[in-house]
Image (cartoon, rainbow, N blue to C red):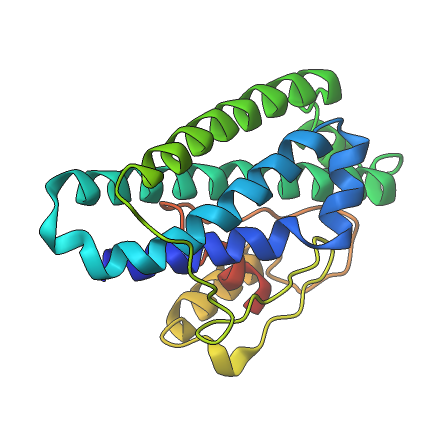
Amino acid sequence: MAESFVFGVADSLLGKLASYAYEEASRAYGVYEDLQRIKDTLSIVKGLLLDAEEKKNKQHALREWLRQIRNICSDAEDVLDGFELQDKKKQVMEVFGSTSMKVRHFFSSSNPLAFRFKMSRQIKEIKDRLDKVAADGTGFGLMRIDDEPRLSVQRRELTHSHVDVSSVIGRENDKEAIIQLLMESNPKGLVDKSLSVIPIVGIGGLGKTTLAKLV
């Protein structure tokens, strides 16, 4: 069901926002307070989703409310993925920046001040939209339900690349395709300090980050 998908995305976002690494990175970029507000509001909305699941077939307005949450969660996932990517760029520059012209050229458009401004604006927009749907949810008479017996939050560290392979189904072909592309970019298998980048694109919630960690 669509609401179950949204619930899963919301739960994944909360797992990111609750991690120590995300907290430290958000402080460094000056967006800690806004991300904490998003986490608090998203926790409320996630509880409301469980009640909405039982009532959605009775009200058209409630189905529209669920659609809005789905869009917000997808947008929030994209914003947090961008936040995580920027932090990875910083780490790569620290390792390769002084020795590899290729890496410096690839990240030359990454302006920390411009990124901070853009990220702050996007996070504020997500926070405002989330606050609105959380307030609208009370108009449907929804009760916040504790989800702990049904689904536990999986904490994901920003700098952690491990993924439980047993929990990933149907992505083996995608993983092999990416590995093949990486091998083709370095056909002799030489170890050097250049950087090969394979973009993985798609709508929020498809598992792009999980697929990247499988490689």
Q: Position of residue 207 (x, y in %)?
A: 44, 59
Q: Position of residue 178 (x, y in %)?
A: 48, 61
Q: Is residue 39 above or below residue 172?
A: above
Q: Is residue 60 above or below residue 128?
A: below
Q: For the point 68% across and 24% down, which residue is it?
A: 110
- Is residue 24 visible to us here? yes
- For the view shown, which residue lies furthest in the right direction? 98
Q: Quick one: quadrant of the C terminus?
A: bottom right
Q: Is residue 195 above or below residue 97?
A: below
Q: For the point 78% across and 32% down, which residue is it?
A: 101
* Nearer-the-camera pick, 157 or 177: 157
Q: Position of residue 72 (x, y in %)?
A: 39, 37
* Nearer-the-camera pick, 85 or 158: 158
Q: Position of residue 82 (x, y in %)?
A: 58, 37
Q: Is residue 158 above or below residue 110?
A: below
* Nearer-the-camera pick, 76 or 81: 76
Q: For the point 57% across and 53% down, which residue is it?
A: 14
- Is residue 109 visible to us here? no
**Quadrant housing residue 133:** top left
Taking 129 as reference, is 196 left or right? right
Q: For the point 47% across and 68% down, which residue is it?
A: 175
Q: Quick one: quadrant of the N terminus?
A: bottom left
Taking 109 as reference, is 57 left or right? left
* Nearer-the-camera pick, 125 or 51: 51
Taking 206 as reference, is 31 left or right? right
